[in-house]
Image (cartoon, rainbow, N blue to C red):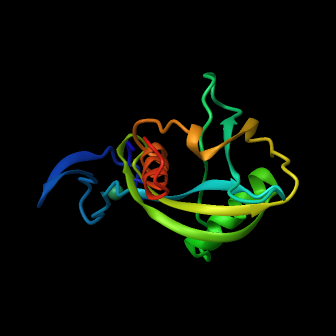
Amino acid sequence: MKYCPRCATPLAARDLGARARLACPAAGCGFVHWDNPLPVVAAIIEYLDGTDGDGRILLARNAAWTMEFYAVITGFLERDESPEEAVAREVKEETNLDTEAVALIGLYPFPRKNELIIAYHVRARGEIALNAELAAYKLVPPAELVPWDGGTGLALRDWMKGRGLPV
Ligand SMILES: [Zn+2]
């Protein structure tokens, strides 16, 4: 953010307590760009495809990504939603799966995107149909998952540890 969203004055660094912030220098404006992280929900989807026992984990490749990388489903909360409702809605929108159970894994700072990840384990059923945001998916047995560094990868690692899987 370079300009004040209230009065369009160029923002300038100002020391406000613990750290320097970008703030509006215009007299009487007072706008401060606090730059606080935005919460996002993430779903480690366990796909219950009718077979007995534990399901496989659905990882998907974002259509906007150039690299061959599969990750968990993420999304933003709507104003009137709980995080649990948001994660179930995102799973439905992006994969067409119906959520049966949602369990919190943990909260993970993601400084690169200035987000706070609220990560859930979601058990879901149905016919997989990706929306336009996703290009491809794969179903991975939990024991074969390889968590990536940072962000949602930390949640995946913690979930695996909780199941006694080697990471
Ligand atoms: Zn201003």
Count the marks.
0
In the image: residue 116, left or right of residue 127: left
Q: Decide which of 8, 126 is in the foreground and name it.
A: 126
Q: Decide which of 72, 35 is in the foreground and name it.
A: 72
Residue located farthest toward the right when viewing the structure as drawn: 127
Q: Is residue 104 above or below residue 32?
A: below
Q: Is residue 103 above or below residue 64?
A: below
Which residue is depicted at the point 32% across and 43% down?
A: 10
Which residue is depicted at the point 71% across and 58% down?
A: 91
Ligand 1: give its quadrant: bottom left
Say which quarter of the image contains residue 134: top right
Relative image position of residue 70 (x, y in whole percent): 62, 34
Which residue is depicted at the point 12% across and 58% down?
A: 18
Q: Decide which of 69, 115 is in the foreground and name it.
A: 69
Residue located farthest toward the front when viewing the structure as drawn: 52
Relative image position of residue 77 (x, y in whole percent): 58, 64
The C terminus lies in quadrant? top left
Relative image position of residue 154 (x, y in whole percent): 42, 47
Relative image position of residue 36 (x, y in whole percent): 35, 58
The N terminus lies in quadrant? top left
In the image: residue 94, left or right of residue 146: right
Residue located farthest toward the top when viewing the structure as drawn: 67
Which residue is depicted at the point 58% across and 76% down?
A: 82
